[in-house]
Image (spheres, rainbow, N blue to C red):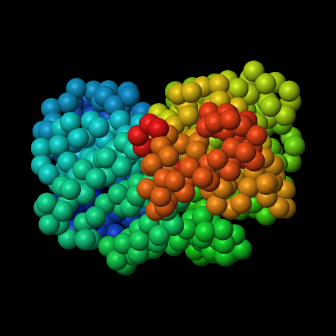
Amino acid sequence: MPRSRTSIDARAAQHAAVVSTVIRLAPGHGPPHQRHLSLLAAAAAPPVPPTWTDPAARAVIALFAARARRDNLTDGAALVRRYFEGVRLTRPAELADGTRSQLHASVGEYCNAVGWPQMGARFGAEALLFADTEALRYRALTVVALGQALNGEYESARVSLANAREVFAAQGWARADTAYVEFLAETLIASAHLQVDRLHAVSAAMTAAQPDDPYWAHSARSVEAMAQMLRGDMDGGLAAIQTLLSEEGARHSHTMTRHFLVCMRSDMLVAQGRSTEALATLAPYENPDGHGICFSMQRAASLLHLGRERELLAETEACVATGADHCLRTLTPLLLRRALAHRRLGERDRATASTEAAMVLLLRTGTSGTPFVMLPHGETRDLIAAVMLERPEFRDAMPCVFDALAVVTAPDLPAPRFGLLAGLTPTERTLTHRLTTSLSIAGIAEERGVSVNTVKSQVRSVYAKLGVRGRYEAVEALTRSANAQPACGRTADG
């Protein structure tokens, strides 16, 4: 039966959209047309070819990219498994290197979008392996960077991002060619290190790069809401998130961004003592493959503040059972929440084991503040300090960890508790922060811009007030009380 003219025209339009989009996925030719992305995102997934050829691959390249960028994620990870086992195609392939690179990059972008960052990074690495131009190398690096950042591997993500930007700058491509996933990776790295100014810069750069793309605009405004939360503007942040999640505000948005907004709303409600409301906010959501967003982890924070420890452990049991398949960025805070629950229930060995596992992940992926968001301050500090005292290999991370605790945890009491530090002057309290680092006395003096003799005099005063005979005893006392909040930094021994 002959095809209708309408059918022929539709197929021709889709083919033209595929050709144009594939060319524009890598920088140098301008971004893909929004109309083409919308058309391709709604198209049916092609059948698996008996043998992969470049034309067959191009249709799938465009499909995965369009679905990621226009938020058609209904098929989830099943769409990836339709064509791949792991990162390998399930059928023989006769593909040019550049085509293979593009295919893996698009699938990696899609994996990141559905919240499966481990696979996103793996597909990005395969794309990098076959990238035969600088444009394809840039695209692969940005996909890798986002997968690493979503997985909580912030130092690796920083390196991948720096390499991608070096390629971009060397080629002199237009600002509009900057990859969306580059901005998302930058956002995650900045938020992990609590860098509010950097978040504002990312938002402005996104708006400047694609001022007419509503998806980019929604993401840029979401980054601003994240900055508000980190600044402590809970009321302003909640209002912004409400607008962004409204039917009108979320019409052109990405699932990952909306899920982050829901989680931020939950965190801010917990900070305001509205944990029951936070649980209600999270109720409709289930964990995606890979747990790039882990709603069980988010619920655990509310359950902890409500004193529902056994319910917390039951909620997160399946997450722990997934092991290496669980996103590390969300697994670390989940382990800390479980540790606090075990501690409250008197299960100290389990609490210690869970805390140690969390600290190992934290050191492996790069120390950040996000695992401690909205955990009870004093309890968390005591838990971490006890483990650090027993495990010297964690000691160098103490300054960064305690700095993060001071910023992102939820208060236990209306007013600060100084405990062991109550008799110290503000200057002496600041000095105790430095004593728990590996800075020498000379290093402390240089950092503070005072003489060595001044520091020695202040140190003697601190020792006298703490009732200790030297630095080792002082550090031990401060660590046990968990009242020191050292500054982040690592220098020479002293």
- Please tell me which residue is depicted at 44% across the width and 37% down the height of the picture: 493
* Along the viewing direction, whichever of 182 and 196 lies nearer the viewer: 196
Number of numbered discs: 0
The spot of residue 273 in percent (x, y) is: 82, 60
Q: Nearer the viewer, residue 83 or 232?
A: 232
Q: Quadrant of residue 472?
A: top right
Q: Work out whether residue 46 or residue 462 is closer to the camera in this orientation and state it.
A: 462
Q: Is residue 162 left or right of residue 460?
A: left
Judge whether 214 appears above or below 325 on screen.
Answer: below
Q: Residue at x 20, y 36 (%)?
A: 129
Q: Nearer the viewer, residue 482 or 314?
A: 482
Kindly tell me whether residue 308 is visible in this rendering. Answer: yes
- Percent coordinates x, y for residue 49 in the rendering: 27, 34
Q: Quadrant of residue 124?
A: top left
At 68% from the left edge and 35% from the top edge, which residue is drawn? 469
Q: Is residue 170 left or right of residue 475?
A: left
Q: Is residue 465 left or right of residue 96?
A: right
Above or below 240: residue 115:
above
Residue 283 in sight from this viewpoint: no
Q: Position of residue 459 (x, y in %)?
A: 62, 48
Q: Position of residue 262 (x, y in %)?
A: 65, 59
- Does 390 sit left or right of 424 as displayed? left
Give the answer, above or below, for where 355 lies relative to 273: above
Query: Where is 68 relative to 474, above or below?
Result: below
Q: Quadrant of residue 435?
A: top right
Q: Residue at x 60, y 52 (%)?
A: 457
